[in-house]
């Protein structure tokens, strides 16, 4: 699916541009353009093999996303048993969202690999009492933190795991102190060289969002984020004011409901039903204290999700999916609980006794039939015209040209290999013309169906004596988008 016709994710363009800056040695520009993350560095390495930047990003995601199933399997096998580990691994492989993010230019799958591997190494080190695994766990936790700031959650999970195994009597106080010191101290020692390198090149310490966005979220007050100016509020409806009042008084309930909704949406309804069986209806596989590390894993991710949505008032499916990975273990348990329900039902009917031994295969096939069509479908098909438009513009000689336009059309110019300057929202026609001149570009790209909601009545105010429509016949054939290119006439 890496080589399918799916369109690059909007964030993917950002990561590719960062990777190009790294490749050019322009590290200083990265801080000005965005933020540091390990993922673009991996794209640079992959680009040496695959040459195409988009394909390189997709391959990094696909390879690391695929490899992440191995530590997940090992963790589940260690804490539960082999058969649950196999089912959890299969569910990971066929999960629609996991596959979608593992085949696009996104840093999610890289983060999954580093974070789950860190957890497996920590578990291995705690159970075998070998410090080398704890050091490696610290290494992979650092890699996860440099990929996404949620890696801090992995750091907390491992610390709690160390205390849990001490509480269970697996080792004494001396070993507890040693594990904590080795895990905490190893990270700055391991990453001191690359951090000093960036410090010398940039003039300041650079650790990605962990050093910038995370402190901002912690220190930022959200007390007045839902406040609306009285003059604006007076122009709204009574229903809106009532809804806003409810939202303000019960915002934490709203946050939790949003987290649960995005978790179910990203996790898949089938897996969620199996999860319910695995958590609330346990008959065949009894509850075990060995599941506590998984509970800690899931709980910390939930609390970090709550912190994020409380600070930003935003929560995407990518964030919800993080909780879905440990939840796959309980979905695997739920699979066997449901299998045993069907098995007991079949055993009560003599005519079906011969089929009882196939219940696991039968139920697994049902899961495949329901989920695989979604998993194997090409993500972003509804936006394929953005890619076709970009390729068409490139064929028409607009490669390296400079365009201004609506932000939603950024991907068109990515595939056209052209420079893109996003228009600020709410501009009048006169302000658009002034913007084009100030940015030294004569080309404007818009979607006629959406531009009037982004700019102030653009379609009604466009002046053909100032902006002439460029004749591009193929763009007129599109159904999902109504893309138009204008050229600013010379004065």
Image (tube, helix red, strand yellow):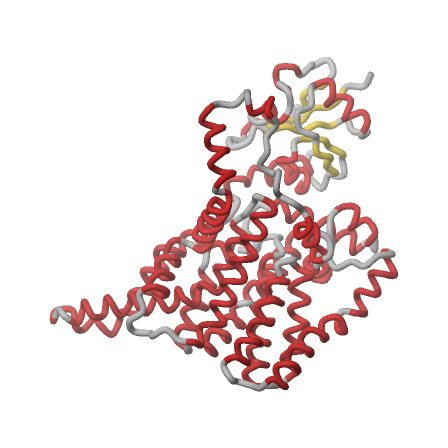
Q: Residue at 62% x, 35% y: name it.
A: 408
Q: Across the whole image, how many numbered discs are drawn on residues?
A: 0
Name the spot of residue 305 as percent of width and height, x first. Answer: 55, 54
Q: Quadrant of the C terminus?
A: top right
Front position in the image: 149 or 252: 252
- Above or below residue 268? Residue 397 is above
Relative to 265, 174 lies left or right: right
Residue 63 is at least partly visible in this image: no
Name the spot of residue 421 as percent of width and height, x first. Answer: 73, 35
Name the spot of residue 180 as percent of width and height, x first. Answer: 65, 77
Name the spot of residue 233 as percent of width and height, x first. Answer: 56, 25
- Above or below residue 195? Residue 261 is above
Q: Residue furthest left?
A: 350
Relative to 88, 54 lies left or right: right
Residue 303 is at least partly visible in this image: yes
Q: Residue at 62% x, 38% y: name it.
A: 224
Front position in the image: 445 or 458: 458
- Above or below residue 108? Residue 431 is above
Relative to 131, 88 lies left or right: left
């Amino acid at each position: 699916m890496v080589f399918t016709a799916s369109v690059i994710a909007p964030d993917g363009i950002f990561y590719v541009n960062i990777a190009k800056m790294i490749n050019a040695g322009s590290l200083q520009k990265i801080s000005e353009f965005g933020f540091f993350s390990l993922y673009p560095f991996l794209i640079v390495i992959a680009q040496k093999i695959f040459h195409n930047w988009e394909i390189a990003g997709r391959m990094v995601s696909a390879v690391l996303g695929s490899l992440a199933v191995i530590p997940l399997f090992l963790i589940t096998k260690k804490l539960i048993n082999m058969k649950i580990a196999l089912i959890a691994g299969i569910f990971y492989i066929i999960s629609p969202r996991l596959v979608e993010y593992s085949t696009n230019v996104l840093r999610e799958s890289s983060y999954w690999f580093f974070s789950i591997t860190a957890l497996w190494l920590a578990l291995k080190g705690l159970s075998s009492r070998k410090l080398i695994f704890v050091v490696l766990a610290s290494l992979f936790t650092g890699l996860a933190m440099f990929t996404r700031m949620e890696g801090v959650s992995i750091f907390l999970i491992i610390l709690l795991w160390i205390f849990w195994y001490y509480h269970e009597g697996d080792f004494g106080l001396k070993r507890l102190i040693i594990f904590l010191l080795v895990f905490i101290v190893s990270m700055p020692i391991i990453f001191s060289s690359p951090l000093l390198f960036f410090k010398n090149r940039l003039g300041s310490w650079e650790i990605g969002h962990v050093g910038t966005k995370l402190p901002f979220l912690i220190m930022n007050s959200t007390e007045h984020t839902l406040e609306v100016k009285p003059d604006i509020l007076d122009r709204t409806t009574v229903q809106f004011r009532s809804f806003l009042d409810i939202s303000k008084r019960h915002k934490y309930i709203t946050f939790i409901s949003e987290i649960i909704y995005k978790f179910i949406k990203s996790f898949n309804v089938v897996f969620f039903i199996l999860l319910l069986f695995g958590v609330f209806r346990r008959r065949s596989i009894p509850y075990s204290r060995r599941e506590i590390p998984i509970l800690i894993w899931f709980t910390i991710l939930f609390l970090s999700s709550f912190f994020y949505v409380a600070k930003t008032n935003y929560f995407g499916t990518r964030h919800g999916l993080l909780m879905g990975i440990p939840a796959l273990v309980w979905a695997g348990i739920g699979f066997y609980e449901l299998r045993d329900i069907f098995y007991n039902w079949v055993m009560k009917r003599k005519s079906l006794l011969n089929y009882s031994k196939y219940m696991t295969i039968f139920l697994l096939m049902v899961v495949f039939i329901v989920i695989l069509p979604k998993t194997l479908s090409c993500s972003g098909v509804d936006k394929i015209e953005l890619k076709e438009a970009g390729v068409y513009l490139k064929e028409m000689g607009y490669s390296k040209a400079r365009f201004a336009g609506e932000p939603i059309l950024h991907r068109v110019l990515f595939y056209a290999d052209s420079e893109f300057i996003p228009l600020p929202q709410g501009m009048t026609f006169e302000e658009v013309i002034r913007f084009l001149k100030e940015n030294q570009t004569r080309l404007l790209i818009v979607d006629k169906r959406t531009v009037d909601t982004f700019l102030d009545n653009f379609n009604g105010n466009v002046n053909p004596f100032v902006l002439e429509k460029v004749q591009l016949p193929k763009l007129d054939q599109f159904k999902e988008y109504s893309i138009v290119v204008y050229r600013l006439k010379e004065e």
